[in-house]
Image (cartoon, rainbow, N blue to C red):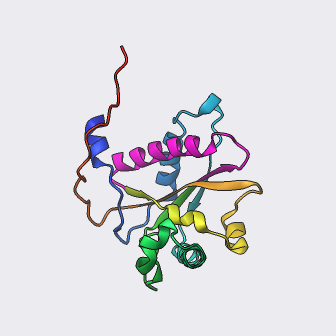
Amino acid sequence: MDFTELLRKRRSIRNYLEKPVSTDILKEIISESLMAPSAGNEQPWKFIIVNNKQLLKKISADCKNNLLNRIKNTPGDYAEKYLKMLQNPSFNIFYNAPALVIILGENNVKNLESDCALAACYFMMSAASRGLGTCWINFAKSLRDAELIAELGFPENHIMAAPLIIGYPAMEPAVPKRKDADILKVVE
């Protein structure tokens, strides 16, 4: 597929087939995401692959609990719009995807968030080129359980920058309508 077709094919997928994604394929996609640019070519990203559905359910439960507590204790929190969804006991923040790839890095890296976001974009495009679907799950950044963090293998002083679920789409949503470019000015 050409690049424009790839851009149109990449969707945020929230409905996956019960089909695992091999670790080899995930490593290939990660390898391609390393081609992303980074500030000063520091390439600060590291990756954790989670293929364990039981662990993903535990992480989901911890994140939901932390988000619900935050909403309760912070009136007007932006996450209030997700309250009913988060209160649903059957809701899994990872949409029952077969795998999660966490892009993380040292918390003292100045451009970590933007560098990892670029790597995440490359990851999502590489996945789409293989017929896989992805979705950035920002809720996962609410993980606080020290035992789960240790089980995931987070090095000390590292933070989660881009949590991405990945799997084979059960269905592909239509391309959402996009706004026209908001070009404020052209300076020639």
**Residue 41 x %, y %:** 62, 30
**Residue 81 x %, y %:** 42, 71
- What is the quadrant of the N terminus in the image? top left
Viewer-side residue, 62 vs 167 = 62
Residue placed farthest to the bottom in the image?
A: 89
Q: Is residue 22 above or below residue 148?
A: above
**Residue 165 x %, y %:** 46, 61
- What is the quadrant of the C terminus in the image? top left
Within the image, what quadrant is residue 68 found in?
Answer: bottom right
**Residue 6 x %, y %:** 30, 42
Magenta stretch secondary structure, dominant: helix
Q: Does the magenta stretch include residue 56?
A: no
Residue placed farthest to the right in the image?
A: 156
Q: Is residue 1 visible?
A: no
Residue placed farthest to the front in the image?
A: 75
Within the image, what quadrant is residue 154 found in?
Answer: bottom right
In percent of the image, x 36 and y 55: which residue is there? 132
Within the image, what quadrant is residue 168 found in?
Answer: bottom left
Q: In this view, does 53 lie above or below 106?
A: below
Q: In this view, does 177 lie to the left or right of 69?
A: left
Q: What stretch is highlighted in magenta?
A: 103-132
Q: Can residue 155 be seen in this view?
A: yes
In percent of the image, x 63 and y 37: which residue is there? 43
In percent of the image, x 35 and y 26: which residue is there? 185
Q: In this view, does 151 lie above or below 162?
A: below
Q: In this view, does 90 lie above or below 74?
A: below
Q: Is residue 10 left or right of residue 115?
A: left
In percent of the image, x 42 and y 58: which residue is there? 135
